[in-house]
Each structure stands twice: as C-alpha cells, then as structure tokens.
C-alpha cells in the first residue's frame, strides 16, 4: 500500500469544495449498510451466543470488552495511515477493501467456534473470534466518516452524515431482524444444544458476510477520491506529512476544544448504548418472560434473543427514516438543540423498558431509542467535522472513537458485577441506568461549541436538497 505525503493543514489558502449530487453522496456511504449489517448481527446475537457457549451473566460484560478495546487501538492507527495513503484505489478505499475481505471471513467464524472446542475453552474461543471480527470491522469502518468529511463542503455535511445514518439504519434493520425472520418466516430452527449456535443465527451470519463485502465493493467502484494535488487545493498543504505513528499522541494533545466537549456527550451516550446492547436479551428474558437468570439455552430464552433482534430492528428502522429529517430539523432549531432533544427522547425510551407490561410495549421504547440513535450517528460528527484541522480527518475521527470505546470499556468492567451485586440479578436496572446516562448526554451537549454552525449562518442557505 503506497504511502505518500498527503496530509494537509489549513495554513494555505484553499478553494471551496464542489457540491456533490445526492447519488454521489449515497454511493459514497453505501458500504456502511454492510458494516452495520455486521454490527447489528453482533449486537443482537453476541450475548446470546456467548451465553450458549457457557458464559455466565456476571461475566458477560467482561467478554464484551474486546470490542471497545480493539476499537480504541485499531481506529486511530487506521485513521493516521489513511490520512497518508495514496495508491490506485485511493486514500480511504484501500482500507475499505481490506476490511471487507477480512470482516466477511470473520463473520463466518464466530458462530462456528464450536469446531475448535477441543483445543480450549469454548467461551474464550468465541471471545477471540469476536475480537477478530471487531478488528476487521473497525478497519473497514473508520475511514468512512473521514471520506464524507474529505469530499463534502460544510454545507452538505449534515446531509452526508444523515444519508450515512439512513444506510446504517437500513443495514441494521435487516441484520437485527434476520435471525427472527429466518425462524418465523422460513422455518429455520432457532434451537441448539448448549455449546452450539442455532441454525437461524448461523445462516444470518453467513448472509451478513456476503452483504458486508458487496456493499463496500459498491462504494469502492462508484466513489471518487481527490488525488493528492486536488486534495491539496481544497484542504491546504501538508506540514507533517512524514510524521510517524507516534504523531498520534501529538494530535491527541492538540485535540480541538469542540472535540473535548463532545467527548463528554459521547461518554454518556455510548455508556448507555453499550448497556442496552449488553443486557436487553437478559432483561426481556427475566423482566418480561419471567425466566430465571440462570436460563440461557431454553426455547423461551432463544425467543427473547430473537425478540431482541426484532426490537433492535425497530430502533434501527426508525433511525433510518428519522435521519433523513435531521437536516431540516437542524436547520430550523440548530444542531445542538436537535441533538439534545433527541437524546432526551432516547433516555425516556430506555427508562420506559422497566415499565413494559409485555414484549410488544418494547416497540415504543425502541422507537424512542431509534430517534436518539439517528442523532448519535450523525450530529456529533457534523459538529466535529467543522472543528477538525484540514487534512486531519482520518486521525481525529479515529481519536474521537476514544470517546465511544472508553465508556464501553468502563461499562464492560462494572456492568455485569452491578447486575449481580447491586441489581440483585435484575438486568433491567442496567437499562434504567442507561436511560439516565442518555439524559445526562442531552444536558452536556448544550455546552458544546459548534464553529461549523457559525460558518453556515454566514452563508446563503441552499435549498434542502443541497444542505
């Protein structure tokens, strides 16, 4: 992979970037459909898979730590080098392709950990496969947000990240609901003995591998990246193009003020989301279905796991639709206020799970979460992109991932012991805490400085289709 001096700064005069058509923006983010398909399969099924491999609920969050730990290592490194890469494929696209190939392979490994049970602990083998899958998905995912910031002028970034969120939601709907659909609509069994993965879940992971690869391949084929000379025209000339990997720490030290403020918002938001992903299946099983916390392989427990996929599909579906409304809402009431209101709605949704009289009520809860999810996937990045020095999009998008992974690591360490020792084996209280943290995020976003909104206010606002 050729690496050249292609990192730019804002010190030189730059030309305004041309606006892109809707189809160009759509194609540029289409790979995220496959990425989120893979993540949705993981988020909806990894807890159930690990539980069936023998994991106890009081240690479950510790096994989930591999995902944020891998992310906190991989994303800054990929961001750093993608800022400095140029070859025949482009700047970000080489990482898309490598990530697509590796992730598609990794998606087939997790549900087949049982094949290696003779060489060691099945749970640990499953966790290792989960780590491999996360590393590969992170390799493909990190450059996508940088690509949107690279190619779009500030006036189109809300639209760009909203389309990205729409595609994330679309992929996640299919990925979340697929095991349920395979069982209930096509008759694929959802029952497996302890130590094995149900056929419907296994088939869903295979389908996810194909969707992951094909969607990223479409972005690679259909999207143009600016070559170094043209990129320099829009972003300025490089001052530290030859800086080594250690420059990540220098960039971390020079983190923009807006990023630091958004870090607190992200901390509360992603602590909440991690708790939801981790404990929803067991909350449905115990709080709604009345199963004992020790049940992890009965038909009713698998029904809870499948229903988790359904309601996760709901929140992702709502986010996909609502994301397309975000440009108009943000234009009318502002980016920060938009994000704050959406987070309040999400917090109410998470807290409402405690009061659910039946599993169908959780659809309402996830509608609220879906509104917050759309905003979490779009608005912080829209605000952040306006504060990042030109030519540093990759590395700072990677560093920004710290504020996503650190709260997940903290929740992963304390979450499961709290369920056992504080919540008396009632994981639904972890979802109530998640709702409270979401409300805290809504308050903290009010204090974020958004320089990009000032720039836009000074411009003539284009029609909605161009925002």
Image: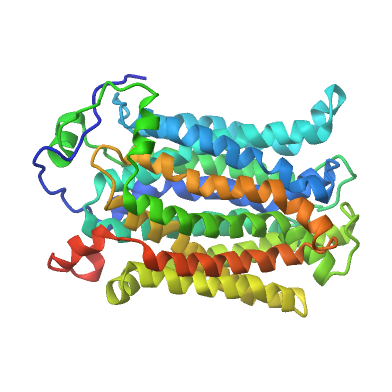
Describe residue 418's horizontal placement relative to residue 8 as left or right. right
Q: How is the image coloured?
A: rainbow
The answer to whether residue 200 of the structure is visible from this angle is no
Task: From the top left corner, tell me how far across and down residue 62 is, in percent.
Answer: 73, 43
Residue reaching furthest front? 253
Residue in view at x 48 percent, y 40 percent:
214
Residue in view at x 19 percent, y 70 percent:
463
Q: Quadrant of residue 367?
A: bottom right
Task: From the top left corner, tell me how far across and down residue 171 is, in percent.
Answer: 53, 54
Task: Work out which quarter of the rendered image holds the C terminus and state it.
Answer: bottom left
Residue in view at x 24 percent, y 26 percent:
240
Residue in view at x 50 percent, y 67 percent:
372
The answer to whether residue 254 of the structure is visible from this angle is yes
Task: Work out which quarter of the rendered image holds the N terminus and state it.
Answer: top left
Describe residue 107's horizontal placement relative to residue 59 as left or right. left
Q: Nearer the viewer, residue 28 or 405?
A: 405
Q: Nearer the viewer, residue 285 or 351?
A: 351
Q: Nearer the viewer, residue 291 or 180?
A: 291
Describe residue 289's horizontal placement relative to residue 139 as left or right. right
Task: From the top left corner, tell me how far across and down residue 142 is, in percent.
Answer: 44, 40
Task: From the top left corner, tell me how far across and down residue 370 is, in percent.
Answer: 54, 67
Count of numbered circles in the view: 0
Q: Nearer the viewer, residue 208 or 258?
A: 258
Describe residue 67's horizontal placement relative to residue 118 as left or right. left
């Amino acid at each position: 992979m050729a690496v050249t001096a292609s990192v730019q700064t804002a010190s030189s005069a730059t030309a305004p970037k041309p606006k892109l058509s809707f189809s160009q923006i759509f194609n540029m983010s289409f790979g995220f459909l496959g990425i989120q398909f893979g993540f949705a399969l993981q988020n909806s099924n990894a807890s159930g898979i690990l539980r069936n491999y023998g994991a106890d609920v009081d240690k479950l969050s510790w096994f989930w730590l591999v995902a944020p730990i891998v992310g906190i290592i991989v994303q800054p490194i990929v961001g750093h080098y993608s800022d400095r890469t140029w070859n025949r494929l482009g700047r970000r696209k080489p990482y898309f392709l490598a990530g697509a190939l590796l992730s598609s392979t990794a998606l087939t490994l997790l549900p087949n950990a049982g094949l290696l049970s003779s060489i060691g602990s099945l749970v640990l083998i499953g966790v290792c496969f989960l780590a491999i899958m996360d590393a590969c998905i992170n390799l493909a995912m990190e450059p996508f947000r940088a690509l949107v910031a690279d190619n779009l002028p500030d006036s189109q970034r809300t639209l760009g990240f909203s389309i990205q969120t729409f595609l994330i939601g679309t992929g996640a709907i299919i990925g979340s609901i697929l095991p349920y659909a395979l069982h209930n609509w096509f008759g694929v069994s959802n029952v497996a003995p302890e130590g094995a993965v149900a056929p419907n879940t296994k088939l869903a992971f295979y389908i996810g591998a194909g969707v992951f690869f094909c969607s990223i391949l479409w972005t690679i084929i259909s999207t143009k990246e600016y070559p170094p000379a043209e990129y320099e025209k829009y972003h300025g000339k490089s001052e530290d193009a030859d800086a080594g990997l250690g420059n990540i720490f220098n960039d971390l030290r020079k983190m923009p003020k807006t990023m630091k403020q958004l870090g607190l918002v992200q901390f509360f938001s992603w602590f909440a989301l991690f708790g939801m992903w981790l404990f929803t299946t067991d909350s449905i099983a115990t709080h709604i279905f009345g199963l004992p916390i020790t049940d992890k392989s009965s038909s009713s427990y698998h029904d809870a796991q499948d229903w988790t996929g359904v309601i996760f599909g709901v929140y992702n579906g709502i986010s996909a639709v609502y994301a397309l409304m975000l440009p108009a809402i943000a234009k009318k009431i502002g980016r920060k206020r938009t994000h704050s209101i959406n987070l309040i709605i999400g917090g109410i949704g998470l807290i409402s799970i405690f009061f659910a009289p039946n599993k169908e009520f959780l659809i309402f809860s996830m509608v609220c979460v879906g509104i917050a999810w759309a905003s979490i996937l779009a608005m912080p990045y829209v605000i952040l992109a306006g504060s990042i020095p030109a030519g540093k999009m990759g590395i700072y998008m990677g560093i920004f991932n710290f504020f996503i992974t650190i709260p997940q690591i903290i929740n992963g360490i304390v979450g499961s012991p709290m369920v056992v020792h504080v919540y008396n084996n009632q994981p639904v209280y972890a979802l109530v805490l998640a709702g409270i943290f979401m409300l805290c995020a809504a308050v903290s976003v009010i204090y974020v400085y958004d320089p990009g909104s000032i720039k836009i206010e000074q411009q003539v606002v284009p029609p909605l289709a161009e925002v």
